[in-house]
Image (tube, helix red, strand yellow):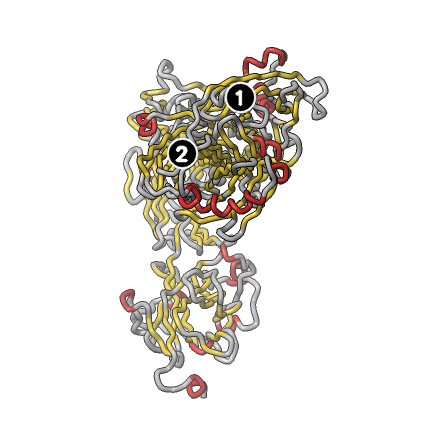
Amino acid sequence: MILYRRSGNMVLPLKMAFLFRLALLAAVSAQLSTASDSIVTSCRRSQIQHDLPADLVFNMFVRFSAIDQHGNAVLITDSFATQCGYKISQDSWGNMTFRISLYSCYVQIKNDTYFTVPVKIEISSRPDMVGAVSYLKTTSCPYSWSPREMVCETNYMEVSVRRKIPEIAEKVLQNEPEDWASAFSSAVSGLLSIWQIVFHKSSTQKTTMLIDAAQNLGYGVNTTESRTLMRSSYNATETVPQMIGGVLFSTLRATLFYKQRWFIYLVDNAVACPVDDVVFSPGLITWTIPKNIPPLLIGAKIFQRSSYQFGLDLLNIKDDEILARKYDITDGVEALTVRIPIGADGGFYKSHVVNREHGVVYNIKPFIENVWIDDAWGVTKYTIIKDILTPFEPRPPVITNDTIPQTLIFNVTIGTFLEDVELINITTGGDTRTVSQAQSHGFEVSPIKYTNGSVGFVLKVPFTDPQVSRKTFPGGFLFTLNVTFGFNIIPYNETFTTSTTIESFLEPPNIVPCARSGSMLTTTIGNLHPSWNVYINNILATTNNQLILDSNRSSITIQVSSQSELVMSEAVGTSLMTAIPMSITDGTGARIYSMVLNCEVEKLVDCSPEGNIKVTVRLLIDIPGMDLSMLRLRDPSCGPTTSDGNIAYFVFPASSCRTTRTFEDNLMIYYNEITYYSTEIGKLLFVMNVTCNYIANGTVEVEYGYKDNPTPSPQSALASLNLVLRLSKDISYTVFYEDGDYPVVKYLREPLYFEVELLSNSDPKLELFLDTCWATTSPDMNSSPTWPIVSKSCEFEELYQTIFHPVALDSRVKLPSHFKRFEVKTFTFMEGDKPYTGAIYFHCDVIICDNSNLSSDPMCSGVGSCIPAKQRAGRSINTNADNLRLISSRAVVLLAPKVESYAAAQS
């Protein structure tokens, strides 16, 4: 029998009985006894065809038998099918076709024009066919034969020839084809009254055997009242491969003869069928059938006419339908060429899995019936039947992320697939769930059917699912879903998976800074989903309660009175602020965001990098008879620069008005306070602490705090200390390279002179120190390689030591403590045993110290051995780079010396 198994994307037969085990699309009918109506039988040219639909043989075993003249069932095996003219096939969707030649072995023939073929079809759920339901199908078909007909079926070649005995003519042998002449000697010496056959492999090589011997070799040989028949497999022992018109053919040339006492009757039974006539190219099937086939034209000299019929599954297709399907048929002089677009109507796609990869094949079953008339044979009808299966075409599923972040739901589409692909499970976070389990878990899983018949699948997963990861970034939140889709291809249960990572970045609501109009504060909140709600201090904002001034699909404008109980006023940093507590929920009521919107009313403290402090004091509390012009700093001589009945302004240097300074971690903190003393009652009624913080590693934000009397909180701010790293043209440190001079080019023998300065600061108590300096080949100070220049505030000592140079007071240098200078030898930069040449960049960590009290300075404690003599009296115990001020130079390009060699330059 024949069993079907999967091999890649092909369905391959095994040599057993014609017994098919099918796993198909639909459930088997419970009433098999009525299923005979589902078997469709038709007469198609010289064939009878039985079509068994997939739903009839779902997960069943099917067996076919021929019925002999005594009513006995003869089991059809694969070799028997080839020899006797049967073809049993199964397409990728599970439909079965049982096709029978009208000249099959057990056909009942009447006048060579009416043919009846009884067959038995058995279907069982068991491989031993116990309990099988049997169907006897007897089909009769009329057919009018041409003098010679050839059929190239997919598993056998068949030729039948009319064998009417012609009248005797003179010089018969001289006019006969060469095959007959070469067979004549064998016929003469043959036995009497016996059919025999001569096979011709070449003009000199031939084999003669009795009919029963040929049948034992698998050939089908038979005669009827008026015709002889020859049937062979494509690879039979006597077949010959032959290239014809660029196409490989399997050819069989045989002469069938019958010897009676007084005459010898010979019939030519040559047949040739193509075996590699189909070529695949991207998107196209090309089928070429040569017209001039020499084995079929022996003895013919004149062609009278030629025509063809084209169709599918042995049914003709009209010309307009051929055009509509975009088939292209070229009837040339030498060949007939058929071009079929892959995927065209008339064939079908089928999904498969090869090497765990999803893809498709395309199957189409065309035929060509070519008819010609020649002077040797009369009419020849030549039919070629093809079952074309294209190579496996990988089709990785396309995953589309249709997520709208504001919905807080992943929306993922995967496809497209043929209808034979079903989604069976979904894996997230290592948990695999069937589709129904995933739906119960809270996922939304639904199929999509497109207009062209293909399908896709949609998966929706809430951002709140435990398997969804969430990361917070300055600009919003990144939600990530790792998902694996599991699929099954029916009917053969081929499975494959596709994994992907879906990301969705949810930007926070876009909040416009507060605007103040009188006592009303307004702000617009954008990037909102229509289903979201906004709450002000736990009160839903609506147009009814007048908290929403305006709204559209993605934004709303909020308004609230600064005097409302929903807000609170407080001093934040250096400003007076009104805080609006806000929260946003989604359509289910789950909270998405919570925030406090600070609306700045006025900035109170401004600390400039130059060391000037500006303070604004507004009359915020009711002190009877308070005169703001009487406000004073610690120094009673330092009063407001200007004042009126409501506002007083102070502007003073950080080193004046008895302002004190301390160091705390990486901060220089200047302290003062503004007070109001009532001479009438002899009591301090108002105190406002003022603080300015300066940090060495860049500009930081102002901080300000405030409380009502009698214990106001201190007001403070931060300001930057600006530094610069310069490259001097010589050791005099008077002329420096400008921005337009970079990159500066230096030769390896030339030293580099650097200067570091603290800019825009006139405080003589401050002193600049170099903590660490180094060089890199990239502007990135953290890149490699690196060369140390200053280490722990000391000159780095190697073969070429860094040299510190003193800084003296001159017209440019007003505060020498704000400068540091050092010299670098360019031979310091080695790569192995050779000096480095190319661009180089210099970087330094700088520390600012109080030179009047180094021992109490937290940043400058911990004296190093080389520091007192060469740089400073104290050293930072905090080596964290974040507490240091980082500066870098622009590019310096190092070149090898023009004349002297490196060795000479060293000496």
Q: Which residue is mark 1?
A: 109
Marks 1 and 2, how far apart in space?
A: 22 Å
For the residues bearing labels 1 and 2, Cβ distance under 8 angstroms: no
Disc 1, SS: strand
114 or 872, nearer to the observer: 114
Q: Is residue 640 above or below residue 794?
A: above
Q: Which mark is residue 397?
A: none
Binning the other alpha carbons within 10 Å of mark 1 as few (below 14), some (14 to 19) or many (20 upward) gives some
Would you say residue 109 is visible in this rendering?
A: yes
Residue at position x 54%, y 25% in the image: 95
Front residue of this view, candidates 815 and 593? 593
Q: Residue 374 in the image: x percent, y percent? A: 35, 37
Amino acid carrying mark 2 in the image: Thr
Q: Is residue 88 above or below residue 830?
A: above
Image quarter where the C terminus lies is bottom left
Asked if residue 684 shows in the view, the reply is: no
Image location of residue 837, percent across then percent down = 41, 74
Q: Residue at x 43, y 88 (%)?
A: 904
- Left or right for 516, reference 254: left
Residue 526: quadrant of the picture: top left
Q: Position of residue 832 (x, y in %)?
A: 51, 75
The crowding category of the residue bearing disc 2, from other C-alpha atoms within 10 Å (few below 14, some 14 to 19, many at least 20), is many
Query: Which amino acid, mark 1?
Result: Ile
* Left or right of 488, for residue 894: left
Q: Please provide percent x and percent y for residue 580.
A: 42, 27
Reading the image, the residue beneath label 2 is 380
Most foreground residue, 242 or 676: 242
Question: Which residue appears at 57% of the width and 64% of the height?
Answer: 862
SS for callout 2: strand
Vertical order, 81 against 672 (above or below):
above
